[in-house]
Image (tube, grey):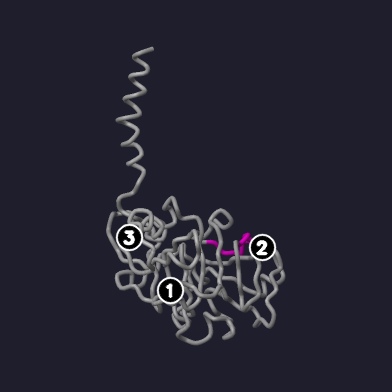
Amino acid sequence: MATYILYCFLLATTILPFARLAVIPSKPTSCAAVKSLKKVSDNGYYSLYDSTNKPYLAFCDFQSDPGFSWTLIESLSLNYARSSTFRKSFGVNVPSNECTPNWSNYRLSKARMTAIKNSPSSTHFRATCNFNADSQKGLQSRRDYLRVSFCAYDYFLATRSTWTCAVVDYINIRGTTCKKCTIPLYSHSGSYHLHIDLETAKENCGRFNVPNLVSSEDVFGNYYHYSNQFSCGASSSSTTNWWI
């Protein structure tokens, strides 16, 4: 009995502390890990590490959504978002300006997106329009905004060729909103970025109906057909921002 007690004591005081340390990453792979490790709260550029332990700069938004720390994985102006180069799902590796982050022509590699998604604290993805990097308070409005959990839509990094009904945490398109509603999300490996076709959404899944939509209007990507009343499509320099 005494031997067993001694064994338990040694396990608790020597082996377990090292086991706990082993699961705490010393090199953050996501902005959530940066916040946890460095105790920071200001929006800005921070060093993350990919699966090969190579560091790179990424923009972190800690302020917009209480309880969330967001890592920017793509930001494209309308002109770039409509180009064939970026009409690709996130399952396709199309990195752009990874070493020089910017807001008009930027996309991380699939490997880096995967490392961020696989971080233990990565639970959701979101899309925003015209994010203001100079604002330390992050988003000041949820107009034209999408947030979805990976549990609800696990095809974020997949190459699919159909739309899938997914329960979204929250969506706002030109002031039309819903929470925990079902929206069709669509992407295709070779010709469609992840996006929502509002006409499809009106007729399928939870039937999310946005007034005055353009025929086959795309939001948050692709933009074969778009409305300049949607913030991401207001002008050629308007940006669509995707985050994990």
Residue 203 location, x and y as percent? 72, 70
Q: Secondary structure at mark 3?
A: strand
Q: Earlier in the sequence, mark 1 or mark 3?
A: 3
Residue 199 location, x and y as percent? 67, 75
Q: Residues within 10 Å of mark 3 (few under 14, many from 20)?
A: many
Q: Secondary structure at mark 2?
A: strand
- Quickly name the residue at label 2: 181
- Quickly name the residue at label 1: 75
Above/below status of 192 relative to 52: below
Q: Residue at x 44, y 72 (%)?
A: 137
- Residue 38 lies in magenta, yes or no? no
Residue 166 location, x and y as percent? 62, 60
Alpha carbon separation for disc pair 1 and 3:
18 Å
Q: Amino acid at mark 3?
A: Leu
Range of residues picked out in magenta: 160-168
Residue 42 versus residue 186: which sits nearer the camera? Answer: 42
Magenta: main secondary structure equals strand
Alpha carbon separation for disc pair 3 and 2:
33 Å
Left or right: where 127 falls relative to 40: right
Q: Nearer the viewer, mark 1 or mark 2?
A: 2
Q: Secondary structure at mark 1?
A: strand
Q: Earlier in the sequence, mark 3 or mark 2?
A: 3
Above/below status of 12 relative to 89: above
Q: Residue at x 53, y 56 (%)?
A: 150
Quarter of image, res 152: bottom right
Residue 53 location, x and y as percent? 28, 54
